Image: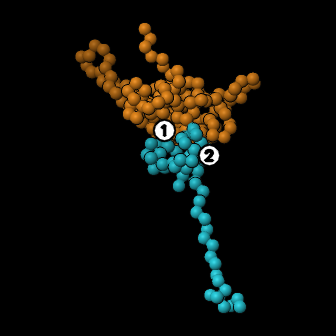
Amino acid sequence: MLVILSERVGVVGAKFDEEAARAKGYDIEALLLGGFIGESSPTTTRKTSKVSKKDNPEKD
Amino acid sequence: MATSTILSNPVVTVNSVDLSDQCTSAVFTERYAELTATAFGDLSNKYVKGLGDHEVVLTLYMSYAASETYATLKSLVGTTTTVVVKPATGADSATNPGFTLTGAFLAELPHTFSLGELSTVDVTFHGGVYSEDTTA
């Protein structure tokens, strides 16, 4: 997902509507290269797995 | 009597980037080729509208800082984009029309350096489809 990185384009952090922008004739690549918009960083946390000793006899 | 203060506080966006605070002049020209339609019997030339040939000429301070003029224009040279100029801030309306050129071509980006002056650049966006947005 693309987000706004510069207040010259809109509210910083808001989603950038790529489809609507292309429909209006905007050059998305130029906005990316200029640092005005960018890919949002993933916010999901990795789930840790636990293996109990009872279920893992090889460890004993 | 003058009834309008034109371009006292205009809004200029290039490729959706608001460059109003870097712009000192914006000339938006809606132009059509004039095709002669004069025929025998006419006593004066007559013309009809041909292809549109619109352009926007902007004078901008050439800032090379992040998210400024150069960052906006550098990747647009040789490509097309959309330029919007409207007389004042606020929503588009009949009294604040957003003059829009969609698919306008930027052919060149000159760099001028003069001693003791803020660097400025004149850029011309040529061609594209002209429209006037009067709805918010």
Q: Position of residue B25 (x, y in %)?
A: 56, 24
Residue marked by disc 1: B82
Q: Is residue B41 placed above or below B59 in the rendered structure?
A: above
Q: Residue at x 67, y 33 (%)?
A: B63
Q: Amino acid at mark 1?
A: Thr
* SS at badge 1: strand
> Which chain does tag 1 point to?
B
Q: Position of residue B107 (x, y in %)?
A: 56, 36
On the picture, is B110 further left or further right than A16? right
Q: Residue at x 58, y 40 (%)?
A: A7
Q: Nearer the viewer, mark 1 or mark 2?
A: 2
How packed is label 1: few (under 14 Cα within 10 Å), some, or many (20 or more)? many
Judge by depth and name the residue closer to the eye, B88 or B33.
Answer: B88
Q: Position of residue B111 (x, y in %)?
A: 67, 32
Q: Position of residue A48 (x, y in %)?
A: 63, 73
Disc 1 and disc 2: Cα gap in Å?
Answer: 18 Å
The answer to whether residue B55 of the structure is visible from this angle is: no
In this view, which residue lies farthest toward the left? B41
Judge by depth and name the residue closer to the eye, B76 or B133.
Answer: B133
Q: Amino acid at mark 2?
A: Gly
How packed is label 2: few (under 14 Cα within 10 Å), some, or many (20 or more)? some
Q: Residue at x 48, y 38 (%)?
A: B82
| The hue in which chain A appears in the rendered picture of the protein | cyan
Residue marked by disc 2: A35
